[in-house]
Amino acid sequence: NAGVTQTPKFQVLKTGQSMTLQCAQDMNHEYMSWYRQDPGMGLRLIHYSVGAGITDQGEVPNGYNVSRSTTEDFPLRLLSAAPSQTSVYFCASSYAGGYTFGSGTRLTVV
Amino acid sequence: GNSVTQMEGPVTLSEEAFLTINCTYTATGYPSLFWYVQYPGEGLQLLLKATKADDKGSNKGFEATYRKETTSFHLEKGSVQVSDSAVYFCALSGEPGSARQLTFGSGTQLTVLP
């Protein structure tokens, strides 16, 4: 089925570890973004990309890196995990104002 | 910058009750407005949207009207069901041609009791 695929669904990291959250879409959407969801705070934008080779920071970019080498993929890298990065992460892609969200990655940093 | 203020939750209703979840926004120009729903353990799904003033979005018995004069986009349903229990997010995105990232409200947890 067409859509946005996120992996893994769950992850536990130790403080200081690094990891990459994967996001792939097969709808040929130019715009992709990463959000984190925390209780009582809605979803906050981490990074976004308007096309391959172009990325920019959102509201809460510190501690995260992104790259966009292809239209399909938009991985999110945690450089050195911290307990404050415990959250649920959502990837989304968009074309002409319509957004499609992945099912999320629940990350716990201990 | 853009912001969305959403009714504080949680909200608990009995089945067949009337639902209103308030949403107001701050934005320049004419943003598009959305309601997203998140069922337990799932991602966000678009519930309805409106792209210009006085537009009414509707889906699955839910409605919301884009009110430019009051900068509001309140979600309503005449008769809720147990299956409507979920978290509801109000959101906006910029005018066509501007930044397209979504700005979300904090979410409202709705529980419908049988």
Image (cartoon, rainbow, N blue to C red):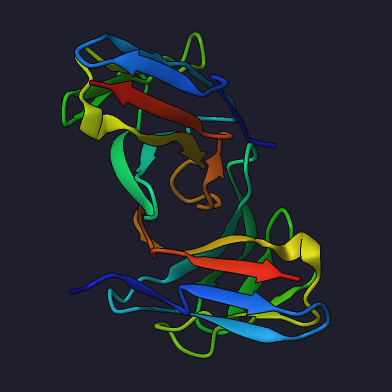
In the rendered image, residue A60, in percent from the top left (x then y), is placed at 74, 57
Nearer to the camera, B110 or A20: B110
Reply above or below: A37 against A73: above
Give the mark count.
0
Picture quadrant where residue B1 is located: top right
Task: Name the residue: 48% across, 68% down.
Answer: A32
**Left or right of A23: which side holds B19?**
left
Nearer to the camera, A82 or B50: A82
Picture quadrant where residue A39 is located: top right
**Left or right of A9: which side holds B86?**
left
Task: Name the residue: 76% across, 80% down.
Answer: A14
Task: Name the residue: 53% across, 49% down.
Answer: B98
Is residue A48 at all visible to an observer of this figure? no
In the rendered image, residue B29, in percent from the top left (x then y), is placed at 54, 30
Reply above or below: B93 against A71: above
In the rendered image, residue A56, in percent from the top left (x then y), is placed at 67, 68
